[in-house]
Amino acid sequence: MPNTTVAQAYQRLIRDIPELGEYYAAIDSIAVGSVTVTSLANSNLSAATYENWIIERPSAATAPDRIRFGSTFSAGAISHSGTNYADTTATSETLRLWKKRHIRPETEILNLFTDSLKFCKFKTRIPLLHGPASGDMQGASTTVDGDWTESGGTDTVTTTAGQVMINGQVLTVIDTSGAGTGYTQQAVLANVGTSRSVLFQAIAKSDVGTSAFQVLNAASTQEFSIPFTQEQWLYIKRLHTFSSTTEQFRIRLAETTAAAEGDWQKAGFTYQDNPYFDLPAYFDEDMTPLGLEVANFYQGATETDTWLAGAVHYETLVEGVHYTFERPFGDVNPQGVRILPGYEWLLGKSLWLTVLMPYSKPYGTAPAFSAETDSTDCPIEEFATQNIVLLGERYPEFASYVPRAEAKLIAIRKTQERRQIPELAWAGPSGGRI
C-alpha cells in the first residue's frame, strides 16, 4: 500500500525546514487578486510580510491559478501581483507559502522529490533467468504485454496485491475461447543447441479451471505440458532435453478449460550450458545488484513437477566463489552475472538476484509522482529525510540541515535492513541444503 503522497511530501518539507515557507490546511476565502487565511490576521505584521513569496494553491480548480507572487498583506489577506484568479471558490483548498522565490514548488521542489526517490531504495529478490524477455513479468506493462502474445484469450499485467505473490506485478491469462484453447506465449522463439538440456521454471496459480505450463518447438509441436488446478501459488520445474533436430522453442502459458484463469508470477528457462546471465532489460544504473541466492522449495505439491511456492528457503551464494557480477558497459546488455567454473551445477537450481531497487522505478516501472494525490511506497520518514539532504546540497542556505539528516538516514536504513530480506549462509552441497 502506498505510504507517501506528493501532498504529504510538501507538507513534511515545510514542517522540517521552517525557513522554507508556511503551510495552511484551509483557505478561508479567495478573491480575484488575493487569498485570505483569517488565522494570519496580525496588526503587528507589515504590508510587505509576504512580498515576493510564492503563493501556491496546490488544489486550484484551474492549473494556471496554482502559482502567484505575493505583494501586500493586510488582515490575513495576501494580495498577489499576477493575473486575476479564474477560480475564486475556496472549497477544501490548502495553501502553501514559499519564502524562497528561486525555489519553485512545481519545478525545483518536485524535481527534488523525484531525485530523492532514486536514493531511497528497498531490498528485494528478482528471478535470474536466461529468458524469455519479461520472463519475470516485471517492467513497464506495455513491454511485458509485447513480450507475450495471446491467442484465444487475454493477458493482462495485474498489480492487485491479492493477485501478486512477490515483486510488483503478475501476468493474468484468461481463456476467452470458450473451449479452453486460450493462451499467451513468448513472442520470440528462443534458440537452443541440438540435444541440449534446459531447465524450465514457473511460479503460478490457477484461479479458475486448469492452467498449464507448456513448451513447444518451432513447429508448434508440444515438447511437454505441466497442468495444474491449485489456487495456491506453485513452483513448477522440469529439466528437459531437446532432440537432435530441435533448435528453437517457446514457452506457452495455457488456460486449458473454458474460462480458465491463471496468474503467472514468472515463467522462464535456464540453459544448462551457459553460465552467463544478462540482467533484465529494465535494470538500470539506479538499481544495485547485491548478491545471488538459491531458492529451495521443500514441500512438494500434489501435481507432477510442482511444489508449494511459499514453502521455500533462500541460501546466499558467495560472490567471487560461486559467481561474479560483470558490467561490460559497451555491450547492448551492460550488466550480467556469471556462474564461476566448478559451480555450473547451480544452473539446475532456482536462482534469485538480490537487488537494491529504487522507489523511483520499482521493478522497472516509474510511478507518477507529480499530482497531489500521486503516491510512492517509500516510507515517509526515509523520503522526508532524503529530501532534506538534497535540499541542503543544492541550496547553500539550507546546508546546516544536512549533517543531522544524513545521520538520521543511516539509522533509518539500518533499521530497515534488519527488517528486510534475511540471509541464510552458504552451506554447500555437503550441508544438505543445495
Image (tube, helix red, strand yellow):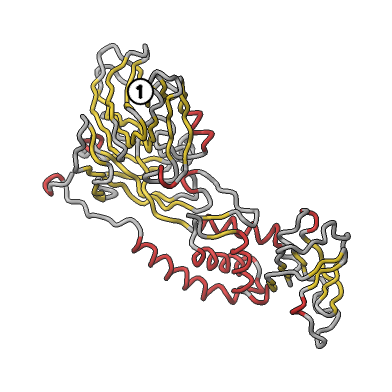
On the rendered structure, is 68 left or right of 140?
Answer: right
- Which percent across, then down, holds residue 149? 47, 24
**Type of amino acid under label 1:** Thr
| Residue drawn at point x = 27 percent, y = 26 percent | 226
Image check: 191 left or right of 154? left
Please identify the residue farthest to the bottom as the structure is shown. Answer: 44
- Residue 254: horizontal and vertical position, in percent? 37, 24
- The quadrant in which residue 194 appears is top left
Residue 178 found in image quarter: top left
**Residue pictured at 60% horizontal, 67% vertical:** 393
Nearer the observer, 392 or 4? 4
Q: Is residue 115 above or below residue 10?
A: above
Residue count near mark 1 (Cα–Cα under 10 Å), binned few <14, some 14–19, many ≥20: many
Residue under label 1: 257
**Count of residue discs:** 1
Q: 174 or 340: nearer the eye?
A: 174
Across and down, in percent, residue 372 comes to 64, 57
Query: Would you place residue 332 above or below residue 193 in this image?
Result: below
Q: Nearer the viewer, residue 37 or 395?
A: 37
Q: Which part of the image, by quadrant, shows the C terminus?
A: top left
Q: Secondary structure at mark 1?
A: loop
Would you say 112 lies left or right of 204 here?
right
Question: Residue 378 at x, y = what percent?
Answer: 49, 58
